[in-house]
């Protein structure tokens, strides 16, 4: 592994690569349905507040740990403090659990590309289309297998250079397109404006602890935090690049895309179904709403194809970084070839992903603690495992490695303007809040309390 460790060429290279991992289905598919479900404007406010404090501090800490040690999470924690080796192990389990269900959604995106290409745009705009598609047994499985197979092929062949070039064009175009779709739908769909207000204006009566739980999980997920990915990226980062600025840029970029995706979807849902539709929002939100918007647009079927192709690329760059992390960890731990490591990851993902996919069809009557399989894996990783890793990272940095070690690493390549806030957040605010949130979300799921 060590011999293959290369560096990003410069700041832009680092920020773009990290942003490529960060911007994905999390922003376009997951953020809008959570924002819709957990209170609109108040969710947005909580999300941004958490991003500036927790998200920023954790991102700086992870990048600094990676750059200081020059290792992936397994090695990094071990090198800094043997007693914290377990954190590295736990961290790499998360991408392994996310990758399968992420690919199921990636498969749905491919199905929608195919649907628009074959001129089925209007049929897809019909009520219940999405539900009946995921309710089938074979077809979603097939799309999922294609998506994960493609990811594995790219990770195996290592043609990421090409992907990087493509995504450099795709990402900015995606943002422009999202902006265009938002403006179009807000201006042309009756009643959309009320949805914009719901999305942007915080209404404190919609606040609940679940707003914070969901916002925090989403923050980790969307910024690829609390699972060792930023540690790995940090290990590739050159010594003269300013960590603080990079963290700000990744956050602004990632949150910007998520915000726009919400603006594209939420007002339209509000116009079509009112506040009840928003309250019932779930993983199907994007797939149900967008075809409806495209159906009202002149040339909507072409825009539909372009849009879903771009989402597909955003998803692919993220699924590649998820799989690459798992494969790199296997290679660090056991003596197998890259091909075998890829096949192992593929096999495991196929099995676990199939469970998530079938959770909507053949096994729809089976639920785990009241959730469908896909929701369950999503909840397990985002609302339980990531907060645990985040907590351990904060305690480790705050009291064992000490914030000064991170501050020194950041200052070795420039200023660290927010270092006071960083120290306070990482030592006290973050651990206490994360613990409180973690405990309440677990108690809530098991029905001990209702929040
Ligand atoms: N951050 C990605 C997204 O928003 C998901 C992801 C998580 C990718 C972890 C890589 C690692 O879609």
Image (cartoon, grey):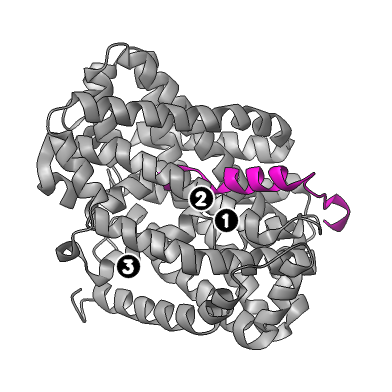
Above or below residue 14? Residue 126 is above
Q: Which residue is mark 2?
A: 252
Residues drawn in magenta: 1-27
Disc 3, SS: helix
Say which label, 1 or 3, has the lower sequence index.
3
Above or below residue 124? Residue 339 is below
Q: Residues within 10 Å of mark 2 (few under 14, many from 20)?
A: some
Marks 2 and 3 in Cβ contact (< 8 Å): no
**124 or 367: nearer the viewer:** 124
Left or right of 375, for residue 131: left
Residue 42 placement (x, y as % from top left): 26, 59
How far apart are the two marked residues, 2 and 3, measured between alpha carbons? 20 Å
Above or below residue 328? Residue 157 is above
How far apart are the two marked residues, 1 and 3, measured between alpha carbons? 22 Å
Residue 392 placement (x, y as % from top left): 55, 79
Q: Residues within 10 Å of mark 1 (few under 14, many from 20)?
A: some
Residue 202 placement (x, y as % from top left): 23, 57
Q: Is residue 146 visible?
A: no
Residue 95 placement (x, y as % from top left): 55, 57
Q: Is residue 8 magenta?
A: yes
Marks 2 and 1 in Cβ contact (< 8 Å): yes
Q: Is residue 21 visible?
A: yes
Disc 1, SS: helix
Left or right of 191, for residue 104: right
How far apart are the two marked residues, 2 and 1, measured between alpha carbons? 6 Å
Q: Which residue is mark 3?
A: 212
Mark identifier at residue 248? 1
Say which label, 2 or 3, has the lower sequence index.
3
Q: Residues within 10 Å of mark 3 (few under 14, many from 20)?
A: many
Which part of the image, by quadrant, shows the N terminus? Answer: bottom right
Q: Residue furthest right?
A: 3
């Amino acid at each position: 592994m060590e011999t293959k460790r290369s560096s990003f060429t410069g700041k832009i290279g680092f920020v773009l690569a990290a942003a490529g991992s960060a911007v994905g289905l999390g922003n376009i598919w997951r953020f809008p349905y959570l924002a819709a479900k957990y209170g609109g404007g108040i969710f947005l406010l909580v999300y941004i507040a958490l991003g500036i404090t927790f998200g920023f501090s954790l991102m700086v800490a992870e990048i600094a740990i990676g750059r200081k040690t020059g290792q992936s999470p397994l090695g990094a924690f071990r090198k800094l403090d043997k007693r914290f080796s377990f954190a590295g192990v736990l961290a790499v389990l998360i991408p392994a659990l996310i990758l399968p269900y992420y690919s199921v959604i990636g498969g749905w995106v491919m199905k929608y590309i195919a649907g628009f290409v074959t001129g089925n745009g209007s049929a897809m705009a019909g009520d219940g289309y999405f539900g009946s598609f995921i309710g089938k047994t074979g077809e979603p499985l097939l799309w999922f297998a294609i998506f994960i197979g493609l990811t594995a092929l790219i990770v195996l062949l290592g043609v990421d250079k090409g992907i990087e070039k493509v995504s450099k064009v795709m990402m900015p175009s995606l943002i422009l397109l999202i902006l265009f779709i938002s403006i179009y739908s807000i201006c042309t769909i009756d009643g959309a404006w009320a949805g914009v207000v719901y999305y942007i204006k915080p209404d404190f009566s919609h606040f609940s602890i679940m707003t914070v739980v969901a916002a925090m999980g989403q923050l980790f997920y969307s910024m690829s935090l609390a699972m060792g990915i930023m540690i790995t990226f940090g290990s590739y980062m050159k010594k003269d690049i300013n960590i603080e600025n990079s963290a700000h840029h990744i956050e602004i970029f990632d949150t910007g895309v998520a915000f726009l995706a919400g603006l594209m979807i939420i007002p339209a849902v509000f116009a079509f179904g009112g506040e009840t539709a928003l309250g019932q929002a779930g993983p199907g939100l994007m797939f149900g709403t967008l075809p409806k918007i495209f159906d009202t647009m002149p040339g909507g079927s072409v825009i539909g194809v372009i849009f879903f192709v771009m989402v597909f690329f955003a998803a692919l760059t993220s699924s590649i970084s998820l799989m690459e992390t798992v494969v790199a960890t296997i290679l660090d731990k056991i003596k197998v070839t890259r091909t075998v490591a890829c096949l192992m990851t593929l096999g495991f993902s196929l099995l676990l992903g199939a469970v998530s996919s079938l959770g909507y069809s053949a096994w729809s009557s089976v639920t785990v603690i009241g959730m469908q399989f896909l929701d369950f894996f999503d909840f397990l990783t985002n609302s339980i495992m990531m907060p645990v890793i985040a907590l351990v990272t904060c305690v480790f940095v705050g009291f064992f490695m000490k914030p000064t070690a991170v501050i020194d690493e950041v200052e070795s390549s420039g200023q660290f303007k927010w270092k006071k806030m960083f120290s306070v957040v990482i030592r006290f605010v973050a651990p206490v809040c994360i613990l409180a949130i973690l405990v309440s979300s677990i108690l809530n799921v098991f029905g001990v309390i209702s929040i």
